[in-house]
Image: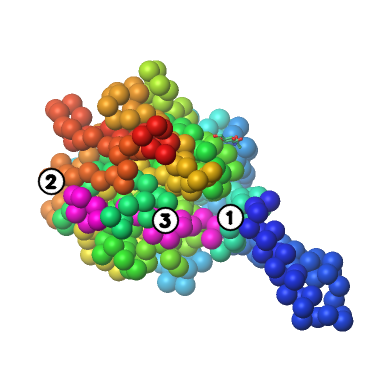
């Protein structure tokens, strides 16, 4: 069990003893507070795990529940009570959008591990079941499925101001563009970086950002992550995130709160990605496209070339109701400085950009959606990293990969202590 839970429990029982000197003994006070925590966890699990029409055991230990599309967690949101589900976007920015993209008429390959043991039928969506242990690993039931605050990179200028360095222990190596955007796309190399401490994570993603970098930042994020605290293992998993108030009260990973509306019956958020790339060996990548439907204003997400996953309804956001002002691509890790030194948690492949293809992790074919709703190469791409001796980023462009970059690193090393 997480240490902070037992500390909280101890403090709670101490309070009970002080106020109820005569009536309640220490042991029954402790039992009371354990029971109320158990109840809170139970209630939360009931909110997250909707009744399934079918459950599939994945070889990696996950249970995938097939939930009727109209019963998904999004519809617990009061604003979504009467929402009519959009079964597909009215517009697709790469001009290749045809019926086949959202229909079931295509050859099926086992894109996610759980496909080996079954499929969800049309009209249902696959949801990774949250287990009691998942919630107990979080610092509190409320924080489960949420990023710690201020987890976004702050590239205010090409040279970061000193007070921004290593803020809150989050480290980044990213490329970014500023302007007026209606989406972004990239192909990202997939690895399984090593995580030193369970409370740290390593992720690689696209950020779609709106607003200023303060209390009301709007963010939509998607990519892959390794997060032992969130998932209970070291697997690389597909994920999304959103917030409309800089990671304070709104938003969450995947479908762990009301927000994202999933329409796809084949891809489960938070499920493991397999296979992953190996050093000097086979390389694997995934494509992610996020774009704003110009008609309804919702932000849609597509995985690979075949899977339109669903959308974030426009009303969730303030700035992003209009357009995004910054797009970022790259890596983020948490450096909790275990043993007073920089973490050895890796970003990307755990190798620096200089090593290049097959060794360092990459993003390629970086694109943004412009105000005419067309995909195009971003102009004025910049890079940002807090400590380039720990994790670095190097951009380039060529005819084959368009705009691309290599990024990542090992964390602690003789130049990063
Ligand atoms: C995850 O990796 C760490 C080392 O990076 C290891 O100590 C831990 O046991 C692993 N956890 C699981 C669930 O495999």
Vertical comparison of 101 with 152: above or below: above
Q: Secondary structure at mark 3?
A: helix
Q: Position of residue 332 (x, y in %)?
A: 38, 45
Secondary structure at numbered mark 2:
loop
Pointer 2 with pointer 1, Cβ within 8 A: no
45 relative position to 196: left or right: right
User: Judging from the image, what secondary structure is the residue with disc 1 in?
Assistant: loop
Name the residue: 56% across, 64% down. 142
Tell me if the residue at label 1 has its CB under 8 Å from ligand 1. Answer: no
Give percent across and percent down for residue 135: 61, 55
Neighbor class of circle 3 (other Cα within 10 Å; few <14, some 14-19, many 20+) is some
Q: Is the residue indicated by label 2 positioned so its CB lies within 8 Å of ligand 1?
A: no
Which quadrant does the C terminus fall into?
A: top left
Pick whichever of labels 2 and 1 is earlier in the sequence. Answer: 1
Q: Which residue is mark 2?
A: 380
Residue 176 in magenta stretch:
no
Q: What is the span of residues highlighted in magenta in the rendered image?
A: 143-161
Mark 2–mark 1 distance (CA, rounded to whole Å):
39 Å
Q: What secondary structure is the magenta-colored segment mainly?
A: loop
Residue 189 location in percent, x, y? 35, 32
Q: Nearer the viewer, mark 2 or mark 3?
A: 3
Q: Where residue 268 sits: x, y (%)?
A: 49, 44
Q: Quadrant of ligand 1?
A: top right
**In the depicted view, which residue is nearer to us: 308 or 299?**
299
Residue 138 tag number? 1
């Amino acid at each position: 069990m997480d240490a902070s839970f037992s500390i909280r429990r101890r403090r709670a029982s101490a309070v009970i003893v002080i106020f109820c000197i005569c009536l309640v003994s220490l042991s029954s006070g402790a039992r009371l507070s354990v029971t109320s925590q158990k109840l809170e966890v139970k209630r939360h699990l009931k909110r997250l795990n909707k009744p399934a029409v079918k459950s599939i055991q994945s070889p990696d230990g996950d249970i995938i529940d097939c939930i009727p599309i109209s019963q998904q967690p999004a519809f617990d949101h009061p604003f979504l009570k009467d929402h009519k589900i959009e079964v597909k976007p009215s517009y697709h920015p790469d001009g290749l959008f045809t019926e086949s993209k959202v229909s079931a008429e295509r050859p099926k390959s086992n894109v996610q591990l759980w496909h080996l043991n079954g499929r969800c039928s049309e009209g249902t969506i696959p949801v990774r079941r949250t287990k009691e242990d998942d919630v107990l690993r979080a610092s509190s039931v409320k924080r489960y499925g949420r990023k710690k605050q201020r987890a976004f990179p702050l590239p205010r200028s090409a040279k970061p101001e000193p007070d921004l360095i290593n803020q809150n222990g989050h480290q980044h190596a990213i490329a970014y563009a500023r302007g007026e955007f209606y989406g972004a796309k990239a192909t990202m190399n997939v690895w399984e970086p090593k995580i030193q401490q369970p409370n740290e994570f390593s992720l690689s993603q696209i950020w779609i950002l709106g607003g200023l970098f303060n209390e009301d930042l709007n963010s939509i994020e998607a990519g892959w992550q390794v997060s032992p605290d969130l998932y209970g293992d070291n697997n690389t998993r597909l994920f999304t995130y959103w917030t409309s108030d800089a990671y304070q009260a709104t938003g969450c990973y995947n479908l762990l709160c009301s927000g994202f509306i999933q329409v796809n019956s084949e891809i489960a958020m938070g499920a493991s990605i397999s296979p992953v790339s190996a050093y000097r060996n086979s390389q694997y990548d995934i494509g992610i496209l996020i774009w704003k439907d110009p008609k309804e204003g919702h932000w849609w997400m597509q995985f690979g070339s075949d899977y339109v996953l669903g959308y974030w309804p426009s009303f969730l956001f303030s700035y992003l109701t209009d357009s995004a002002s910054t797009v970022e691509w790259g890596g983020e890790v948490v450096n909790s400085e275990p043993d007073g030194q920089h973490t050895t948690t890796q970003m990307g492949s755990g190798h620096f950009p200089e090593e290049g293809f097959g060794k360092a992790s990459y993003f390629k074919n970086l694109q943004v959606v412009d105000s005419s709703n067309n995909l195009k190469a971003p102009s004025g791409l910049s890079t940002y990293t807090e400590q380039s001796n720990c994790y670095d980023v190097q951009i380039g462009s060529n005819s084959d990969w368009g705009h691309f970059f290599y990024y990542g690193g090992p964390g602690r090393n003789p130049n990063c202590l």
